[in-house]
Amino acid sequence: MIRRTTAAALLFSMLAFSQTGCIGQMGLSGEVMKFNLNVVEDKWARELVFLVMYIVPVYPIAGAIDLIIINSLEFHTGTNPITDKPRIALREGAEDVVAPDGTRAVASELVDGRIEITTTDEAGNTYRMQLVPVPGGVEAHDIDGKILGRVQGDGILHVENGQTLQLPQS
């Protein structure tokens, strides 16, 4: 019986730590920590509360729930259900490209999966658009949300004025 319990605990631990690829805010664990910090003022009493909450095991269960459920929901929905903040698992920074004529394009991934592209020409004029994933392709929108064009899975660029352009295959 002890071997089964130990094996189950080991398997659960491996499963819990294998889910850490869904990086998240650890919202539930943070709420438990806030409770611990606010329940008493004295630092020694606070330490005692922490130890009790670890032994009972409030902290380990909250951590496992965060790792397996809450952070996965945050990653896939874009919002942490505990903190109600946008997901943190985004690529850091932005892609910055400068063309030979001096035009600069900066692409940044937004929380909801859209990509915002800001271009600045050599005269300093700035233009912004967003690439929005849609079923079967991607749409380009101007900053006001107007559709500029669409690329479907067929590799054809459909521009809103009715023109089409076959994109080169890679």
Image (cartoon, rainbow, N blue to C red):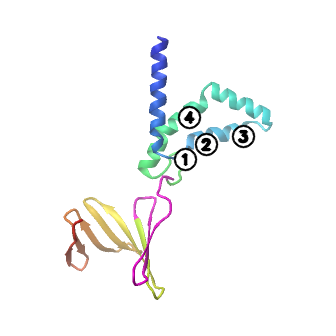
From what the image shows, is residue 128 above or below residue 33? below
Per the image, label 1 sits on a secondary structure element best described as loop
Query: In this figure, which residue is indicated by the disc labeled 2?
Result: 30
Residue 28, position as x, y percentages in the image = 56, 40
Residue type beneath disc 3:
Asn
The furthest residue to the top = 1
Image quadrant where residue 39 sits: top right
Disc number lying in front (2 or 3): 2
Residues at badges 1 and 2 in contact (C-beta under 8 Å)?
A: yes
Residue type beneath disc 1:
Gln
Earlier-in-chain disc, 3 versus 4 = 3
User: Which residue sits at x=46%, y=31%?
Assistant: 14
Earlier-in-chain disc, 2 versus 3 = 2
User: Which residue sits at x=33%, y=61%?
Assistant: 133
**Relative to 73, 170 lies left or right:** left
For residue 68, which numbered disc appears in the image?
A: none
Earlier-in-chain disc, 4 versus 2 = 2
Determine the CA span between mark 3 and mark 1. 20 Å
